[in-house]
Amino acid sequence: MRRLFRVDRPMKPLNRTFATTCLAAAAALTAFTAAADGDRPLACTDFNAHVNGSWEARTELPPERARIGSFDQLRVANDRLLEAALQELVADPARQTSPGLKRLAAFYRSGMDTSTIETRGLRSLQPLLSRVDALTRETLPTVLGELARAQVDQPLALFVGTDAKDATRHVLTARQSGLGLPDRDDYFKDDDTTRRLKAGYRVYVRALMQASGQPLDDAALDAVLALETEIARAHMTPVQRRNPTATYNPHTLASLQALAPGFDWKAWVAAYVGADTRAPAGTVVLSQPDVARALAVQAQQAPLSAWRHYLRLRVLDDHAGTLPQVFEDASFAYRSGVIRGLQKPTPRVERVIALIGGNSGSAAMGQALGELYVSKAYSPVAQRRALQMVDDIRMAAGERIRKLPWMSEPTKTAALAKLSAMVAQIGAPQTWPQYEGLVIEPGDYTGNRLRANVWRTQERLADLGRPVDRTRWNTSANTVNAFAAGGNRIVFPAGILQPPFFDDKADDASNYGAIGTVIGHEITHHFDDRGRQYDAVGNLRDWWQPADAAAYKLRAERVAQLYSGYEPLPGVRINGHQMLGENISDFGGIHMAFDGLQIALQRQRQAGLPVPLVDGLTPEQRFFTANAIVWRSKMREQALLNQLRTGQHSPSRYRVLGPISHMPAFGTAFGCKAGDAMVAADPILIW
Ligand SMILES: [Zn+2]
């Protein structure tokens, strides 16, 4: 699943009243002046500075934030709304009208009850930790399978995914994971940044182990790092991971055993699947076969004590957010402080909400948060208008495909079929999960998280026997993000259909420039360098004429080169290939949304309605202004550096400058001229 924006929360990435004033404030900034030649307006030299410069100058980054901007402010606003709703829910059991809301109230309450968390200590993790302490070479595969069932991180994360070559089928999938440093290269580099990260990680490991009653000496710590280093050696880089063919390696248990002998793969899968699935689990799709080989070798060669320490560390690291303060402090110091530069933890309530819902709202109780959110903050009017926008932008995308100068008719026909088969999920699901069998205990935050994880695994295992349901929601409705999901789907949760992305009361120009470009972005993901390799139903299948694929790659390479030229931090450039899918999606998305706006304006004119200037700006000027506003952000240097090294999204400023400077309609809207910085001499056109 590709997301619109990097999720920036103080969590481990395993696997996202101010607003109404935003547009008005920015509109004041954009008083467009027809300057004389030689004195070009700022809009034509740096549109981000033109719209966001004054906001950046007067906005201070709070010590408890890694980044602040439109996404972050909306997330905080949504969290405040949820906080008030959760307090109501806890105070008044009569409001707990569904199985989800009942459990949500108890889960939330356990998360805010810090004194009970202190008293309970590690009690709820003890069964897992005891399994790890008693580890032998023979039980290692089984213990890893059991930990995977509890969603504890390890060298190969095991989960139920969709079969890339038959998108109607669920299949067990194993993907590289299990490293404590942010990037696999960190284990091998020796520059200032990696030295700082390694030192911080060593402090973190020591602190967690010490707090859990098993302090490590230097030699034991070195052995854990050596084991991680051998796993990291087999990991793909972020660029290599973007190749869907290289990461699709289906194996039977027998062929897996032949590929990576020395590890009992059958026992590993059996422990993960448990006794409660109706489905055969005879196939595993390996994303990184080399990691399977490395795991099998290390299972034989690494000292058992290193495995015990490594797995204890993974359990503690995964659960640090639910444990007593000493664990939380250690986790904050490394994950938020060293990696992202925070000076203070984010408010506890935000951390509890994030933990209940998961990074992208896909954790077990995420849907219950969505249920609560939608009851407070979403209307049928918003749903209808968002649907209209998706229709307009999809129609515009179709027109653009028909007119593409570089694509032949057969590929166009297939691309249009894919576009019309795309499933849009908007707002929230029609029904909510019943959470049968999930036990949430008062006063057991750690245990609740653990049981929720196992429950979620069991739910997904039951999928192994069912066909994929392309209408099912896997994201919580309160999420401030949007997604291009497998099976040719696009997802816009109610949480992002809020100002400044979307406003019921705003004119079309600002809505199409904001959420409209997000809609275009997600549509384009299914046609980016990775997404274009999947067909109308989401199968990894080549539907391109070879000459068209070659023409596409030439254009994609130009996008990669453009972004590789940007230098967000002194000496640190964007990796144009690592970020390629996101950048292509920004490039395509803004064109589609702009054309979608023209369809909406046409409808308005045909209905005899005027299209007036708003705040002195034409609809086109407002469109681009609204787009720049959604990308405004300030970020800590460490967080930015981490994003550049490990992320897929370009820093916000370049998400404004890159696409717009290659869009002739922008120059027209603001009266820019050839030679201006915002007017590319030879614009890149992909979609
Ligand atoms: Zn994206």
Image: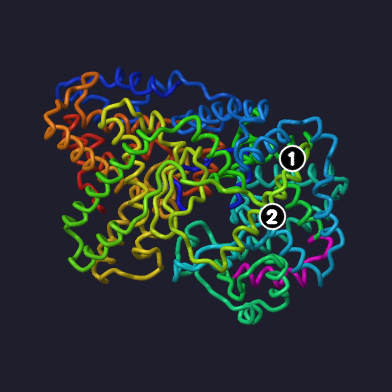
Looking at the rendered structure, the kind of residue marked 1 is: Tyr
Question: Mark 1 falls on what kind of element?
Answer: helix
C-alpha span from label 2 to label 1: 14 Å
Q: Which residues are magenta?
A: 290-307
Marker disc for residue 524? none
Q: Is residue 642 visible?
A: yes
Q: Quick check: 73 above or below 574? A: above
Left or right of 171, for residue 630: left
Q: Quick check: 324 above or below 586? A: above
- Is most of the magenta stretch helix, strand or loop? helix
Q: Nearer the viewer, residue 196 or 14?
A: 14
Q: Which residue is mark 1?
A: 445
Q: Quadrant of residue 305?
A: bottom right
Mark 1, residues whose alpha carbon is within 10 Å: few (<14), some, or many (≥20)? many
Left or right of 474, for residue 439: right
Q: Quadrant of residue 127?
A: bottom right
Residue at (37% x, 40% y) in the render: 655
Residue at (40% x, 35% y) in the render: 497
Question: Mark 2 falls on what kind of element?
Answer: helix
Marker disc for residue 454? 2
Query: Is residue 301 within the magenta segment?
Result: yes
Looking at the rendered structure, the kind of residue marked 2 is: Val
Label 1, ligand 1: CB separation under 8 Å: no
